[in-house]
Image (cartoon, helix red, strand yellow):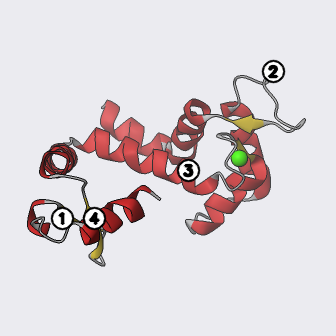
Amino acid sequence: MAINNCIFSVKQASVINYEDQCFSVVIGDKHKTLDLVAPDRDVKCTWVTGLKHLHKKLLTADLCTKHEMWIKGLFKMADKNVDNVLSLKEIIGLLKHLNIECDFDTAKRMFQEADTDKTQKKKGEDSLDLEEFLRFYKLMTHREEIQQLFDK
Ligand SMILES: [Ca+2]
């Protein structure tokens, strides 16, 4: 709605220099673009400066930060009903989506082990919040034999 208003006002005031107000955001590996028109040059500069800052931060983020962002992305992707917690069914769906072979009983056992706040149930169903999901992820990816090699 706001963007339509901006475009409308630009069309009405055709003497305004479009280049001072327009910018494009290039998104993802497929380089899709989102073309935007700011209401004025200052707003455009604020947006472009802010987006450049965020992009630079992402590029210079350390491996741990990028890994944490990736895991948070997985959490969001798996949260099909968008209630900010993951049910066992959503976890199983995520494991299948990631081609992680894990039998139901093992996944359920790790789910229950990660579910530290059992008093908070949504719709009577056990669920994992983001912090518990991180714990679940660590349980799923923990390899004792590799840990022993690092401990030597
Ligand atoms: Ca959910």
| CB atoms of marks 4 and 1 within 8 Å | yes
Rendering quarter of residue 38: bottom left
Q: Nearer the viewer, mark 4 or mark 3?
A: 4
| CB atoms of marks 2 and 1 within 8 Å | no
Residue on which disc 3 sits: 76
| SS at circle 1 | strand
- Tell which of 65 and 83 is nearer to you: 83
Q: Nearer the viewer, mark 4 or mark 2?
A: 4
Q: Earlier in the sequence, mark 4 or mark 1?
A: 1
> Which residue is drawn at the image coordinates 82% and 35% (left, top)?
122
**Residue 25 visible in the snapshot:** no
**Placement of 27 over or under 84, stated as above or below:** below
**Residue 18 visible in the snapshot:** yes
> How many other residues sit within 10 Å of disc 4, few (<14), some (14-19) or many (≥20)?
some
Please state which amino acid type lies under the numbered disc 3: Lys
Q: In the image, residue 109 lies at what x, y percent?
A: 75, 41
Q: Earlier in the sequence, mark 1 or mark 3?
A: 1
In space, the residues marked 4 and 1 are separated at their CA atoms by: 6 Å
Side (left or right) of 33 relative to 60 = right
- Tell which of 12 and 139 is nearer to you: 12
In space, the residues marked 4 and 3 are separated at their CA atoms by: 26 Å
Q: In the image, residue 99 lies at what x, y percent?
A: 57, 69
Residue on which disc 1 sits: 22
Residue on which disc 4 sits: 36
| SS at circle 4 | strand
> Which residue is drawn at the image coordinates 47% and 59% (left, top)?
1
Dot label at residue 119:
2
Please state which amino acid type lies under the numbered disc 2: Thr
Please state which amino acid type lies under the numbered disc 4: Leu
> Which residue is drawn at the image coordinates 41% and 50% (left, top)?
70
Q: Nearer the viewer, mark 2 or mark 1?
A: 1
